[in-house]
């Protein structure tokens, strides 16, 4: 059944659930153009995490809807994400980083009671060193999280809150309500 907008009701409710969420202050969300060839209906958001005036992580969350369903999705809706952040180079070399990055996603989904199925993805850690004409700053490191999952139901507010928690974790933000302690030098 179609909604008054001409879109399927499931898709309309899913998008409304995403639009109803207000993220924490450090996260800026913006509606962006969605890919057109992945599903009959799509909606996308970009996310930007700011910390002390600097951009520390970015991401994109895409909602796909195929009313006929999709066997690999195990449903008619699918959420797809890409999140990236710069890291300290010693962190990027940690062999446990991919497993930790994956738990940022799964723990966030569970903490928000965002019921899901058919989750999968990759965690990529990279380091780059510049040479020659590109020589400049010291080595840089990044983490990339690419994942997708099928939400159970079409109320996606909890899924967006979980995605925002993933962005915050990737950016190294403390949990809401927790203040990061800064090292203070004591002089005598």
Image (tube, grey):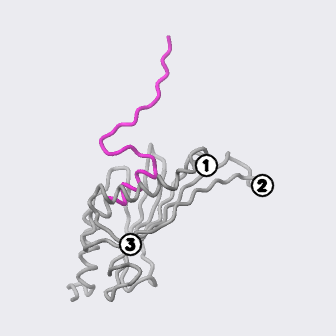
What is the x, y in percent for residue 176? Answer: 31, 45
Residue at 72%, 52% in the rendered image: 130
What is the x, y in percent for residue 15? Answer: 29, 73
Q: Secondary structure at mark 1?
A: loop
Task: Determine which residue is flagged by label 3.
Answer: 118
Task: Determine which residue is flagged by label 2.
Answer: 133
Distance of mark 1 from mark 2, alpha carbons?
26 Å
Whether 180 is among the magenta residues is yes
What is the x, y in percent for residue 173? Answer: 41, 46
Classify 10 Å Cα crowding around label 2: few (below 14), some (14-19), many (20 and above): few
Q: Quadrant of the N terminus?
A: bottom left
Asked if residue 83 lies left or right of residue 78, the reply is right
Instruction: Report the mark closest to the observer, 3 or 2.
Output: 3
Residue 93's tag is 1
Instruction: Report the mark closest to the observer, 1 or 2.
Output: 1
Residue at 42%, 65% in the rendered image: 46
Instruction: Report the mark closest to the observer, 3 or 1.
Output: 3
Residue at 47%, 55% in the rendered image: 101
Question: Which secondary structure type mostly characterizes the magenta part of the structure?
Answer: loop
The stretch of residues the image draws in magenta is 162-188
Whether 158 is among the magenta residues is no
What is the x, y in percent for residue 109? Answer: 33, 60
In the depicted structure, whether residue 10 falls above or below residue 121 = below
Residue 130's tag is none
The residue lying furthest to the top in this view is 188
């Amino acid at each position: 059944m179609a909604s008054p907008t001409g879109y399927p009701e499931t898709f309309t409710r899913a998008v409304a659930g995403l639009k109803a969420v207000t993220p924490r202050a450090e996260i800026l969300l913006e509606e962006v153009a969605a890919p057109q060839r992945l599903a009959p209906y799509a909606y996308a958001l970009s996310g930007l995490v700011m910390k002390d005036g600097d951009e520390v992580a970015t991401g994109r969350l895409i909602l796909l809807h195929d009313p006929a369903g999709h066997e690999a999705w195990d449903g008619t809706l699918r959420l797809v994400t890409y999140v990236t952040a710069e890291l300290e180079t010693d962190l990027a070399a940690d062999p446990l980083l991919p497993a930790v990055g994956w738990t940022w996603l799964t723990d966030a989904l569970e903490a928000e009671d965002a019921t899901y199925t058919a989750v999968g993805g990759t965690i990529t850690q990279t380091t780059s060193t510049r040479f020659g004409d590109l020589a400049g700053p010291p080595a840089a490191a990044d983490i990339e999280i690419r994942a997708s999952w099928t939400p159970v139901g079409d109320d996606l507010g909890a899924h967006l809150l979980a995605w925002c928690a993933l962005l915050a974790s990737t950016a190294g933000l403390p949990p809401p309500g927790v203040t990061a302690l800064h090292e203070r030098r004591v002089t005598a």
